[in-house]
Image: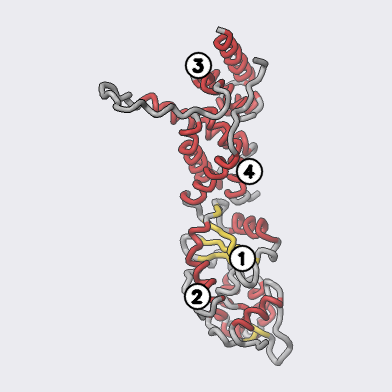
């Protein structure tokens, strides 16, 4: 079974990946992660057995989002210099801001909610992406939602 | 808040733009573009070696079938990257504007069998404004009796116009013969080259 041209794969999944990344890393960083995601996917594409293309590409996007957060955590925050002008407003993801709060959740809950609701994967697919049981993926999403509810009520 | 989260709002145009940036900057094995010409839209595909395919978009099953064939025969790492076909587009434009009589493009013969390659190599030697016969290119390819096989090789020429299979005709005034993009295109190209009048 030969694979379709990669351009067709890209066209079929670009919106799913973009939507996921806007939620996972924000609008500003989404493009870099998008490029990294499809570069990695195209490299592996010819020799990978892909049962579920959407889950496959979103799993790669998830890893690239993690790389992005790790790199940002390592980057030193400049201190000392006082800016002359007020800093430009932080770029915010489109939407109602709930996804920013998701970004502050513990990693497992965050990953489960992002893949389930921004990636629109089933709990089973989320579990495969995260390398955990379906029950664990379901529990992480449930706990994440519960915590979000508590924070929003506070 | 219910038992689900609303997906983030996003602009599909942003996703399309990100995908276009990817196609333009990534390093696929095959880059393709659709090129308009006076004989119709062409699907042009190139590898690092050179032009591998120049197919009439309304023939050979259409654009998708051509790309499927390339994915199966060369590599599935295929992206639409028009800038990588600029040289092909320029030479074709010059040809159709009567400013070019021979193509200087590098070719990739990946889609061509060994016998067909010999037939097409002989076909490339036919100069602009001249014609030859199926029997002659078969003989040039090493088998004078294989004019029907030569006809098949020309009919499956993946790079028409650049490999000028339109210059190969039946011998003895039996008509101009078939053409991969339809006989009307063969006639149009021969008219452009001054072989057919009117």
What percent of the width, then of the height, locates residue A17? 57, 36
Q: Earlier in the sequence, mark 2 or mark 1?
A: 1
Q: Residues within 10 Å of mark 4 (few under 14, many from 20)?
A: few
- Give the residue pinned by disc 3: A106
Relative to B36, A93 lies left or right: left
- Indicate the quadrant containing the C terminus of chain B: top left, top right, bottom left or bottom right: bottom right
B186 to B41, vertically: above or below: below
- Give the residue pinned by disc 4: A12
Q: Nearer the viewer, residue B45 or A133?
A: B45
Q: Give residue B124's quadrant in the image.
A: bottom right
Q: Earlier in the sequence, mark 3 or mark 4?
A: 4
Alpha carbon separation for disc pair 2 and 1: 16 Å
Q: Give residue B192's quadrant in the image.
A: bottom right
What percent of the width, then of the height, locates residue B54? 59, 67
Q: Give residue B131's quadrant in the image.
A: bottom right
- Give the residue pinned by disc 1: B42
Q: Chain of mark 1?
A: B
Color scheme of the displayed model: secondary structure
Identified at 63% across, 28% down, the residue is A125
- Give the residue pinned by disc 2: B103
Question: How many numbered marks, from 0 up?
Answer: 4
Q: Residues within 10 Å of mark 2 (few under 14, many from 20)?
A: some
Alpha carbon separation for disc pair 2 and 3: 61 Å
């Amino acid at each position: 079974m030969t694979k379709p041209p990669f351009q067709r794969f890209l066209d079929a999944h670009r919106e799913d990946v973009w939507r996921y990344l806007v939620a996972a890393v924000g609008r500003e960083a989404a493009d870099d992660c998008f490029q990294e995601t499809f570069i990695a996917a195209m490299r592996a594409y010819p020799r990978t057995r892909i049962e579920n293309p959407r889950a496959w590409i979103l799993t790669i996007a998830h890893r690239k989002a993690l790389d992005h957060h790790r790199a940002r955590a390592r980057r030193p925050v400049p201190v000392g210099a006082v800016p002359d002008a007020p800093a430009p407003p932080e770029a915010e993801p489109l939407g109602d801001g709930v996804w920013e709060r998701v970004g502050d959740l513990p990693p497992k809950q965050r990953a489960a909610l992002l893949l389930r609701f921004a990636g629109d994967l089933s709990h089973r697919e989320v579990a495969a992406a995260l390398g955990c049981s379906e029950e664990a993926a379901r529990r992480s999403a449930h706990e994440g939602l519960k915590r979000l509810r508590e924070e929003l009520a506070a | 808040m219910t038992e689900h989260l609303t997906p983030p709002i996003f602009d599909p145009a942003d996703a399309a733009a990100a995908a276009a940036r990817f196609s333009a900057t990534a390093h696929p094995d095959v880059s393709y573009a659709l090129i308009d010409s006076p004989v119709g839209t062409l699907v042009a595909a190139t590898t690092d070696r050179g032009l591998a395919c120049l197919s009439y978009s309304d023939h050979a099953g259409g654009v998708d079938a051509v790309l499927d064939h390339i994915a199966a025969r060369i590599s599935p790492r295929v992206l639409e990257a028009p800038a990588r076909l600029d040289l092909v587009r320029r030479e074709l434009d010059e040809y159709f504007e009567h400013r070019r009589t021979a193509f200087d493009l590098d070719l990739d013969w990946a889609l061509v069998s060994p016998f067909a390659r010999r037939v097409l190599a002989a076909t490339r030697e036919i100069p602009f404004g001249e014609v030859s016969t199926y029997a002659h290119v078969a003989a040039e390819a090493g088998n004078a009796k294989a004019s029907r096989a030569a006809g098949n090789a020309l009919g499956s020429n993946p790079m028409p116009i650049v490999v000028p299979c339109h210059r190969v005709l039946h011998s003895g005034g039996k008509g101009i013969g078939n053409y991969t993009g339809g006989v009307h295109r063969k006639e149009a190209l021969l008219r452009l080259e001054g072989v057919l009048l009117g």
